[in-house]
Image (spheres, rainbow, N blue to C red):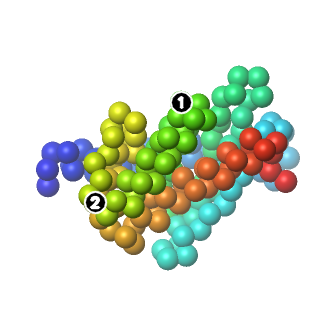
Amino acid sequence: MSDLAQLYQQVILDHAKERYGNKPLIAGTGIDHSPLFGSSHQVNPTCGDEITVETEIDPDSGAVTVRWDGQGCSISMASASVASEMVEDLNDEEFAQVEAAFHELMHSRGAGEPDEDLLGDAAAFSGVSKFPARIKCALLSWMALKDALAQARAGGAA
């Protein structure tokens, strides 16, 4: 295994163990949340991975807070951690670029070269694209995050 592959593997293992954004959810608890709140639950029926992502956008600063809870393989949980960390540091346009680049990388069948400057830790998932059965694992949280953000930006989840 190359040094880069080992580094990427370690990034995924670290995020799977120390999960950024993996916090108790607030929907349905009676805890007040911003009117710019979104929530999305996604399931990968192939392997049973599932995740619920909540996003809140501060109406004054535009800052995004992400909470998620889920269960699944190391790839899906690490991907949720990476996506959550990234979205809090990026504006809408930047996150859209990163999400599109990650989606493209996951569908490259191992032939894509990750843009590490754009993708940051998400570049570590480049090897996942060689395994079609695992691509959905890596994309699950990104779909949930994108959906929850769209709800929040539309004025909140119903």
Q: Is residue 38 above or below residue 50?
A: above
Task: Provide the secondary structure element on which disc 2 rests.
Answer: loop
- Residue 75: which quarter of the image? bottom left
Q: Give the mark, 2 or 1, whose residue is nearer the N terminus.
A: 1
Q: Residue at x 14, y 55 (%)?
A: 1
Question: Is 72 situated left or right of 118 in this image?
Answer: right
Q: Which residue is mark 1?
A: 89
Q: Amino acid at mark 1?
A: Asp
Q: Amino acid at mark 2?
A: Gly
Q: Residue at x 21, y 49 (%)?
A: 6
Q: Answer few, some or many: residues within 10 Å of disc 2's Cα (few below 14, many 20 plus, some between 14 and 19).
A: some
- Residue 64: which quarter of the image? top right
In the displayed orientation, state which residue is furthest to the left. 2
In the displayed orientation, state which residue is furthest to the top. 61
Q: Which residue is mark 2?
A: 110
Task: Provide the secondary structure element on which disc 1 rests.
Answer: loop
Q: Residue at x 73, y 29 (%)?
A: 58
List x then y, in percent, for residue 80. Answer: 51, 50
Q: Is residue 93 above or below residue 6?
A: above
List x then y, in percent, for residue 97. Answer: 50, 41
Q: CA distance from mark 2 to mark 1?
A: 27 Å
* Residue 16 - label: none
